[in-house]
Image: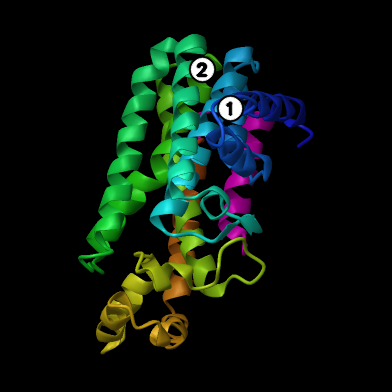
């Protein structure tokens, strides 16, 4: 906060500006989500990536705003797809304004992100569109699980690499580019962001089974039939668990607690934590070619903190 606090405060101001106007009630739904904060991990990673090579310029702060706008848009859409009731401790936008308004609020944020990129970094517009395509592809593959249960690790891997990691990689690559990093530096920061995003999602999966003071309902993913790695690994290791999972997938929620207990007892959560630590190490290793600096050290701190979190 001391190192990027002033720049992050400017990102917050730009976020508030981005949702200050627009057709109602979609604008209010967008403000409702953005105003309730979040970790702002992606803007922080982008700001630090830029400072690995140079100063934070207005364009850097604008793109920090862009990645958070995109992330917020995906949350608004996810809550509709997942029928989410609560996020960050408050009722979701869909619960207050309805699904249609929540979808359109997400669309407003995406349009704002694209317009800001076109104005402040037009050469990055193609990269942003490519990132959005991957995010959508990952969401579609995950959504297929609602009707076609597939608990293979291959399907999980595809969702993981398309739904979460691309925006992290975009943020860190863009930060490096706008900060003046050369092609090798940009590639190193993109590799860092990709691995960071994967580790982030793996820990998020574990939190659904072991978290306590979290913003998401415990066991929500299992109840919704969403694929998480602890479940995938437990199904492969525990005889008969796949049949109970299919019953839950078919609507029998009475088995959720029993399945969750067996997932935890199988040791799958510890294995996922181990894999998260591996990707954290991979992320930090990707920074080795980058010259030593406070910004680089803080990126390492961010990676360790995200891997260690329990909420």
In which quadrant of the rendered view does residue 6 lie?
Answer: top right
Q: Nearer the viewer, residue 292 or 33?
A: 33
Residue 16 image position (x, y, % from top left): 67, 29
Identify the residue at horizontal 61%, vertical 16% (top origin): 54
Q: Is 233 rendered above or below residue 252? A: above
The quadrant of the rendering that contains the C terminus is bottom right
Our reading of the magenta stretch's main secondary structure is helix
Identify the residue at horizontal 43%, vertical 31% (top origin): 170
Q: Is residue 196 visible?
A: no
Mark 2 lies on a secondary structure that is: helix
Residue 140 image position (x, y, % from top left): 27, 49
Q: Is residue 88 visible?
A: yes
Q: Is 109 rendered above or below residue 145? A: above
In which quadrant of the rendered view does residue 207 lie?
Answer: bottom right
Q: Is residue 77 left or right of residue 12?
A: left
Q: Nearer the viewer, residue 275 or 175?
A: 175
Label 1 close to label 2 by CB (< 8 Å): yes
Residue 127 image position (x, y, % from top left): 36, 23
- The mark that comes first in sequence, 1 or 2, is 1
- Magenta-colored span: 288-311
Mark 1 lies on a secondary structure that is: helix
The quadrant of the rendering that contains the N terminus is top right
Colour scheme of the picture: rainbow
Identify the residue at horizontal 33%, vertical 45% (top origin): 162
Dot 1 surroundings within 10 Å: few (below 14), some, or many (20 or more)? Answer: many
Q: Which residue is mark 2?
A: 116
Which disc is residue 65 wearing? Answer: 1
Residue 5 image position (x, y, % from top left): 76, 31
């Amino acid at each position: 906060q001391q190192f990027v606090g002033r720049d992050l405060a400017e990102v917050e101001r730009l976020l508030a500006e981005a949702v200050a106007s627009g057709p109602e009630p979609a604008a209010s739904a967008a403000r409702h989500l953005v105003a309730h904060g979040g970790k702002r991990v992606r803007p922080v990673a982008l700001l630090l990536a830029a400072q690995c090579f140079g100063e934070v310029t207005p364009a850097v702060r604008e793109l920090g705003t862009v990645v958070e706008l995109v992330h917020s848009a995906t949350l608004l859409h996810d809550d509709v797809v997942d029928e989410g009731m609560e996020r960050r401790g408050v009722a979701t936008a869909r619960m207050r304004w309805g699904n249609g308004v929540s979808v359109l609020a997400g669309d407003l944020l995406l349009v704002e992100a694209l317009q800001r990129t076109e104005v402040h970094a037009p050469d990055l517009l193609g990269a942003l569109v490519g990132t959005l395509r991957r995010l959508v592809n990952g969401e579609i593959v995950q959504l297929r699980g609602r009707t076609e249960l597939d608990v293979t690790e291959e399907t999980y891997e595809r969702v993981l690499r398309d739904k979460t990691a691309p925006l992290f990689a975009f943020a860190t690559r863009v930060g490096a580019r706008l900060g003046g990093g050369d092609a090798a530096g940009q590639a190193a920061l993109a590799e860092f962001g990709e691995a960071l995003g994967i580790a982030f999602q793996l820990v998020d999966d574990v939190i659904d089974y072991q978290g306590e003071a979290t913003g998401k309902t415990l066991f929500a993913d299992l109840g919704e039939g969403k694929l998480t790695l602890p479940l995938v690994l437990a199904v492969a290791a525990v005889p008969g668990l796949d049949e109970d999972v299919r019953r839950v997938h078919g609507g029998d929620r009475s088995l959720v607690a029993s399945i969750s207990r067996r997932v935890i007892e199988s040791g799958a959560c510890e294995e996922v934590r181990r894999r998260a630590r591996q990707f954290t190490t991979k992320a930090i290793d990707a920074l080795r070619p980058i010259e030593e600096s406070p910004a680089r050290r803080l990126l390492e701190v961010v990676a360790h903190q995200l891997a260690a979190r329990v909420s």
